[in-house]
Image (cartoon, rainbow, N blue to C red):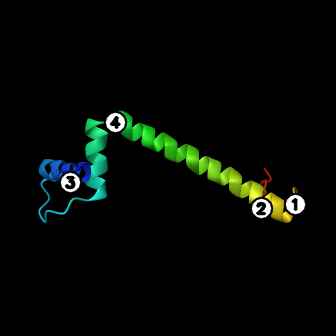
Amino acid sequence: MNLKEYMIDYVGNKHNPENDDVTVDMVVETLAEEFPEFLLMVAEENYIRGYEQALDDVNSVKQKYGQQATVHKKKSKKRKNK
């Protein structure tokens, strides 16, 4: 039995789904309960990669359209008269 089969079997036995289908949500829930430090590391890595990708995207836009290009224009706030 390989790790994938073991995980699916373990999660299936723990959650005991009616239709015998093990979902990603079930796997994540089980990891969060039994191995939270692993799931935290995956979440941190995902966050860092997403942030790096956003910075790369901004740099690509600036290279293509010039340094003055804005990715998202700031919305002006309307002031109400009191």
Q: Considering only order in the chain, which callout, 4 or 1, is on the residue closer to the N terminus?
A: 4
Q: CA distance from mark 4 to mark 2?
A: 38 Å
Q: Residues within 10 Å of mark 1 (few under 14, many from 20)?
A: few
Q: Is residue 20 left or right of residue 55?
A: left
- Contact check, label 4 and label 3, Cβ < 8 Å: no
User: From this viewpoint, is residue 62 visible?
Assistant: yes
Residue to which mark 3 is pinned? 5
Image coords of residue 47 (percent x, y) = 53, 45
Q: For numbered disc 4, what is the local secondary structure? A: helix
- In this view, the residue farthest toward the front is 1
The residue under label 3 is which amino acid type?
Glu
> Front-most of 70 and 1?
1
The residue under label 4 is which amino acid type?
Pro
Q: Is residue 78 left or right of residue 5?
A: right
Q: Considering only order in the chain, which callout, 1 or 3, is on the residue closer to the N terminus?
A: 3
- Contact check, label 3 and label 1, Cβ < 8 Å: no
Q: For numbered disc 2, what is the local secondary structure? A: helix
- Contact check, label 2 and label 3, Cβ < 8 Å: no
The residue under label 2 is which amino acid type?
Val
Image coords of residue 66 (percent x, y) = 87, 60
3 or 1: mark nearer the eye: 3
- Residue 22 location, quadrant: bottom left
Residue to which mark 4 is pinned? 36
Q: With respect to residue 10, does 21 lie above or below?
A: below
2 or 3: mark nearer the eye: 3
Q: Considering only order in the chain, which callout, 3 or 4, is on the residue closer to the N terminus?
A: 3
Residue ID at (13%, 66%): 19
